[in-house]
Structures are given as C-alpha cells and as structure tokens.
C-alpha cells in the first residue's frame, strides 16, 4: 500500500484574497506608506522590541483581513536544513550573553543575532505578503501617482513610473504561470539521456537554452497581447488616471501603526540605553 504524497502549495503573490474587510478597503497609498515607515524603523532599529511589535501588527491585520491558512506555501525541507545549519554555525561565534553548561561557558551572542535576523526576514516577508493578499493590483498605480504628485513640480514623470509599475505587477503573475506551463511541458517531452557525463552536461545546457528561448518568446507574445488590450481601452494613461484618495479608516490605521511603532521604538531606545 503506497502512502499518498502531500502536494506542495506554491507561494501565491500579487493576487488578493477574496473578501471585503477593513484591511482590504484601506487605500493602497496608506498601505505603501505604512510599509515604508515600518521598513525604515526596522532598518535603523532591528531590535527584538520593534520586530515583536511589527509581528503583532501583522497578526492583527491577518486576523482582520481573514486570511486563510491555505494561502501559506509549503516550506521545503532543505530550507529547514539550511536554517539549522546557519544556527549551528552562528552559535560557534560566541559572544554575550553566556551560559554555563556542565562547567563549560557557552556564548549565545551569535545564535541570538542569527535568530534576530531570521525573525526580521520572516516579518518583512510576511508584511509584503500581507500587502499582496489584501491589495488589488489595479489600485497600486493610482496610489503611486497620487503619492508622487508633488514630484511633478520637479518635472519627474511620476505618471509614467506608476504605469510601468502597474504593468509590471500585472504581468508578473501571468509570466510565472506561463513559465510553469513551459517547464511542465518541457519535462513531459521524451528525451534521450547521454551515456557520458560530458554529454549530460551538454544536454543540460541545451535544455536551459531552449527553455529560455521559449520563455522569451512567450513573454514577447504576452507583451504584444497586453499592448493591444491597453490600446483598445484608451491607452496606458488610464492606469494612473483613476481617482484614488484616503478615507477616515486610513487615518485610524496610520495612527494605530504610528502609536505601536513609536512605543516600540521608545522601549527599544530605553532598553538599549540601560543595557
């Protein structure tokens, strides 16, 4: 009797989870500004207190947005092995604080730094995924155009940047699906396995070149189809011409994030000053 293998779930981004919640209804510009503010905070003060505060904010937002567990991807085993190897390697660095085990003093500084960097990476990835799961791609370009409106006085083509960003975000999921189909079709094709190692290496490079050529052809075909669709709908300017503005829930969300992040920063500075 064979045990059925568990199917791996891929990471799905740039596709919002269906639903109408308070997080979904927030203005895209507010989400971008809050993510930028949190990124600046964690860049200059990557301590445990700010990381914990941002993690709590993400958990609250996930709860409010009703994000199901099914959207989480399957973590491959090799990633757990790499994390374990990195933790063991970092533990050899030592450093304060130190503990004594069976008469041997062990420094935990390197291990704690590794855990802090790992937690910071997970928090930033979760923050980006949350924005992706609660924001429609069509709302990004108008929000960027509205936020960059003061830059027009400096003759910066903010509308063209917003259109380019919108097209890239729209094309990214489509190209990923196209590449997966090409890769699956390539694997289904029968192929002859060379007998020598040199022949196998040569065959591998030939397969890679063929796959890249097919991917480029598919990307060009998709770009041509998207260009025709944009022209039929009135041009690329329509991406950034939509009305986009914040409302009172955006002010509440921004005030909540600022209060929590400000409190975390104050605690971090206090703890760092007394340690």
Image (tube, helix red, strand yellow):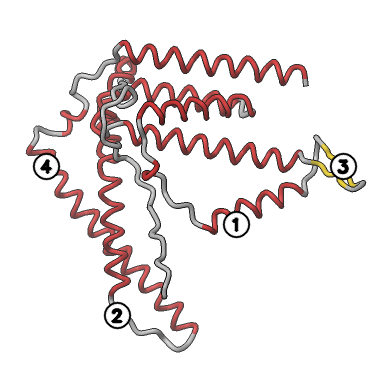
Q: Quadrant of the C terminus?
A: top right
Give the side of residue 211 with respect to residue 220, left or right: right
Q: Which mark is residue 100?
A: 3
- Depth check, front residue: 24 or 172: 24
Q: Earlier in the sequence, mark 4 or mark 1?
A: 1
Q: Residue at x 64, y 29 (%)?
A: 48
First reached walking from the N terminus: tag 1 or tag 3? 1
- Distance Cα–Cα, label 3 vs label 4: 68 Å
Q: Earlier in the sequence, mark 2 or mark 4?
A: 2
Q: CA distance from mark 4 to mark 1?
A: 46 Å
Label 4: how many Cα within 10 Å (few below 14, some 14–19, many 20+): few
Q: Earlier in the sequence, mark 1 or mark 2?
A: 1
Looking at the image, which is closer to me, 205 or 59?
Answer: 59
Q: Tell me the CA gap for discs 2 and 3.
A: 60 Å
Whole-Å distance between the Cαs marked 1 and 2? Answer: 33 Å
Kindly identify which numbered label has been placed on residue 81.
1
Q: Which residue is labeled 4 in the image? A: 229
Q: Give the quarter of the image for residue 163.
A: top left
Estimate the x, y position of residue 123 in percent, counting from the top left.
52, 35
Tag shown at residue 204: none
Residue 187's place in the image compared with 36, above or below, is below
> Which image quarter is the N terminus in?
bottom left
**Which of label 1 and label 2 is nearer to you?**
1
Whether residue 156 is visible, yes or no, is no
Q: Which secondary structure, mark 2? A: loop
Find out whether the residues at labels 2 and 4 contact each other: C-beta distance under 8 Å.
Answer: no
**Image spot of residue 64 (x, y percent):** 38, 26
Taking 271 as reference, is 181 left or right? left
Q: Nearer the viewer, mark 2 or mark 3?
A: 3
Choose the circle earlier in sequence order: 3 or 4. Answer: 3
* Residue, disc 2: 190
């Amino acid at each position: 009797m064979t045990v059925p293998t568990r199917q791996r779930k891929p990471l799905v981004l740039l596709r919002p989870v269906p639903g109408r919640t308070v997080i979904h209804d927030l203005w895209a510009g507010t989400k971008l500004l809050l993510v930028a503010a949190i990124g600046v905070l964690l860049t200059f003060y990557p301590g445990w207190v700010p990381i914990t505060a941002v993690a709590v904010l993400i958990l609250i937002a996930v709860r409010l947005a009703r994000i199901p567990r099914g959207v989480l991807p399957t973590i491959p085993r090799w990633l757990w092995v790499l994390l374990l190897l990195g933790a063991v390697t970092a533990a050899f660095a030592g450093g304060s604080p130190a503990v004594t085990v069976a008469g041997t003093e062990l420094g935990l500084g390197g291990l704690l730094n590794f855990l802090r960097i790992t937690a910071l990476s997970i928090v930033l990835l979760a923050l980006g995924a949350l924005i992706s799961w609660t924001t429609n791609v069509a709302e990004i370009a108008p929000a960027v155009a509205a936020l960059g409106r003061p830059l027009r006085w400096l003759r910066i083509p903010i509308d063209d940047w917003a259109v380019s960003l919108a097209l890239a975000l729209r094309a990214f999921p489509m190209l990923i699906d196209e590449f997966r189909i090409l890769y699956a079709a390539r694997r289904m094709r029968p192929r002859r396995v060379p007998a020598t190692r040199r022949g196998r290496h040569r065959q591998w490079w030939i397969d890679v070149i063929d796959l890249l050529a097919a991917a480029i052809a598919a990307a060009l075909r998709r770009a041509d189809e998207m260009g025709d669709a944009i022209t039929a709908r009135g041009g690329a300017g329509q991406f950034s011409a939509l009305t986009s503005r914040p409302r009172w829930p955006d002010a509440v969300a921004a005030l909540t994030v600022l209060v929590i992040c400000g409190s975390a920063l104050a605690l971090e500075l206090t703890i760092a000053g007394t340690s």
